[in-house]
Every structure is written in C-alpha cells, then in structure tokens.
Image (cartoon, rainbow, N blue to C red):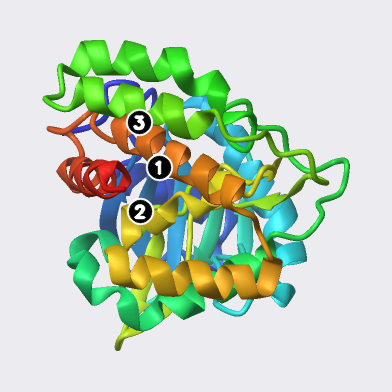
Amino acid sequence: MPHPMIEVMVDEELARRLLLEQHPDLADLPLAWVGTGWDNAMWRLGEHLMLRFPVREVSAHLVEHEQAWLPVLAPRLPVDVPVPVRVGVPGALYPWPWSVVPWFEATPAAATPASAHSSWAAQLADFFVALHVPAPDDAPDNPVRGDDIAARREPLRDRLARLALPDADRIAARFDELAAAPRWTGTPVWIHGDPHPANLLEHGGALRAVIDFGDITSGDPACDLATAWMTFDASARALFRARVDEGCGWDDAMWQRAQAWALHLSVVMQMHPVEYPHLAAVGRHGIEQALDR
C-alpha cells in the first residue's frame, strides 16, 4: 500500500519515458520496481543502476542535497554510498529532480535479525567516525534532525497519544530522563540523518553500503548514533560504542542523547505499520532496546 502522503506515483511507463527524454542511452535497460518509501520510488535499471524519484514535493529538495553533497563526502567514507552517476531534471513529464544511482547487490539490515548485525558493528562505527567531522556553513538545513533532542518532547507525546502504544508511559518517562542530558555545544558535524537498518545494506556478513542521504544535515551526531539501539542488540551495541568512542571520544551525554533520539525515531517508525511493516518492526526493536537500561 502506498504512503498516504505520496503526491506523484512513478510507474514503469513514467520511468521509461523520463529515461527516453533525458538519458536515452539507458532507456532500453530492463526496469524492475524495488519499492516506494515515504519519500522516493526506486526502480532497478539493468544490473548495476537504480532510479530514485521523489514522490512528494518536500522530498525533491532531499534528492538535490544528495546530488550536491554525496560526491563531496564519498571519498572520505570507508563504505560505498549511492553517489549519483546521472541526474534528472524537472520537466513536463515530472516536476522534480531525480537521480540515477549505483545498485548495490545486498540485503537491507531491516530484513535480517539484529543478532546477525554484530559482524559489521565495527564497520558502521568507522563510517560514523569518518562522517562526523565539522560540516561547512552551507550544509543542508534539516528542521527535524541534529538539533536539540529535548525539542522532540511534544511531538513524541503527540505520536504516543495517537498510537496508544502499550509502553507509552515508560517511553515518555525514559525519553524525559535521557533528553535532560547536557546539550551539544560542539561544532556542527556532518550527519546522515536517517541511518536506520533499512538504509544499511549488508552482504556476506559485512556492511556493503549506507544509502538514503536525503536527510543529510549538520548538528549533533547523537541523532545518527541512535542507530545503536535500532540496529543492534546489547552486545553489538557495546562493540559499536567502544569503536566510536575510540575514534571520536564522545562523553556519556552524547550517548544519552542518542538513546533519546532512538526512542523518538523508533516511535516515528510506528506511524504507518500497514504501509511499512518492516519499518514498524525496526521501531519496535528500537523501543525495546532503548527502554532497556
């Protein structure tokens, strides 16, 4: 079922027509639908490429951010990221920019048990150590990532009231406790913005790629480190934290804010369980882990 906020459905006919119009040398390659998320529709193109189309206006700017900044960041990162190999422009057929990106032969970590992720916990830690460096002043703005986690208190409570989760009171109380940690006062660093398990690709027991940089921004890296609870179990999380701390030297307050972000983001993932059951499952795991002291 499509997300209720989708504004433009990108079917095979539209994808093919856009290729014919803008990248005709690619237009004869086979097309296979990969999925449609909250922000983008994905079509595999041949064996080695994928098309990435925004499905709502707010997402178009996210694709532009990927097109502008992934070529800059990719050389410093220790795993592959989907640097666009071609770009599409708005036109009469379709109103927004779109991208042709590499296809990675891999499995989203959201499709495998958290207990299976420990083999690449150190790899993901190294990715964040490389990414979380001071960002330039013109890094993309993002009003919902990388800021003061305490500002998420009311949105969290609103969602808890709408969802009627059985652990709502525990979630709210634990969030308040964690979000009381000292605020980030360091130089804003690059932030992926959405490194949950559906955006982490694994293959052969290793981290193959980190994808979906639409939420890229700068600010408090605790936002990204929330994935420690959403992706791993307790033992792998300890390994991940030790490796990150070795590279960055974060204090306990960083990890308290990260755990608060994990609760917030995990609740967000419960908002559309019918349309996106795999994200709802990620959220349930994240809540369970983040409530565990």
- To which residue does mark 1 refer? 262
Q: Is residue 285 left or right of residue 53?
A: left
Q: Quadrant of residue 87?
A: bottom right
The answer to whether marks 2 and 1 mark residues whose Cβ atoms lie closer than 8 Å is yes
Is label 2 in a helix, a strand or a loop? helix
User: Badge 2, how many Cα within 10 Å: few under 14, some, many 20+?
Assistant: many
Residue nearest the observer in this picture, 51 or 120: 120
The crowd level at tag 1 (other Cα within 10 Å; few <14, some 14-19, many 20+) is many
Residue reaching furthest bottom? 204
Which of the two marks, 3 or 1, is nearer to us in this view?
3
Q: What's under tag 2, amino acid-wise?
A: Trp
* Residue 30 at x, y percent in the picture: 31, 68
Write the residue at 74% across / 52% down: 68
Name the residue beneath numbered marker 3: 174
- Above or below 141: residue 103: below
Between the residue at mark 3 and the residue at mark 1, the CA separation in whole angstroms equals: 11 Å
Q: From the viewer's perspective, is residue 258 above or below residue 109?
A: above
Q: Relative to 277, is 238 above or below?
A: below
Mark closer to the observer (2, 3): 3
Q: Is residue 277 or residue 44 the one in the foreground?
A: 277
| In the image: residue 184, left or right of residue 256 | right
Q: Residue at x 25, y 59 (%)?
A: 110
Q: Which residue is tagged 2?
A: 229
Picture quadrant where residue 143 is located: top right
